[in-house]
Amino acid sequence: MPTPESFTIELAATPDTVGVARAQIDRLAGALSDQTMEDARLLVSELVTNSLRHASLSPDQTIGLSFTLLDRSLRVEVRDPGPGFSPAIRGTRSTDDAGWGLFLVARLANRWGVHHDGGNSVWFELDEATMEASSDEP
């Protein structure tokens, strides 16, 4: 079955939502490197968790998740109807166990951002590494 170039899903705000969101990345198997898939799983987990923790969602509200394959990158967007926020990235010296989501996004993503348009949206892009031909010859 061919890999989709883009897809969007709506997720219920339930405890199993993070796992469901993370599993959606498997739909892109074969189109992305293992490292990009792992990074995407981690960042999706962090952003969906942020939506669950901070968006004050009611049981009838959902979290939107979009994946788009671009030329040599993956774009992911996580949307919720929450009040929005101004991004603040913690320093590496923090001793808190929680609150590392945006720090990880800033570290792993090639590009990312936040926008508010009647809801809250955080997006990131992961570029595929350019593989150089290797040779055993000197």
Image (cartoon, rainbow, N blue to C red):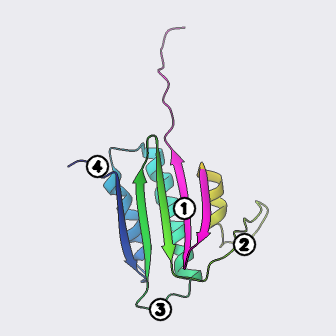
Query: What residue would you read off at disc 4?
Result: 3
Q: Callout 1: helix, strand or loop?
A: strand
Q: Are marks 3 and 1 in contact (CB under 8 Å)?
A: no
Q: Kindly identify which numbered label has been placed on residue 96.
A: 2
Marks 2,4: beta carbons within 8 A: no
The residue to which callout 3 is attached is: 58
- Kindly indicate the quadrant of the structure image that contains residue 117: bottom right
Number of numbered markers:
4
Q: Residue furthest front?
A: 117
Front residue of 38/116: it is 116
Q: Residues within 10 Å of mark 3 (few under 14, many from 20)?
A: few
Q: Residue visible at 53% across and 61% down?
A: 43
Q: Which residue is mark 1?
A: 123
Which residues are drawn in magenta?
Answer: 111-138
Q: In the rendered view, would you say 60 is above or below 33?
A: below
Residue furthest toward the left?
A: 1
Say what amino acid the circle numbered 1 marks.
Trp
Circle 2: residue type: Asp
Instruction: Give the mark nearer the N terminus: 1 vs 2.
Output: 2
Quadrant position of the C terminus in the picture? top right
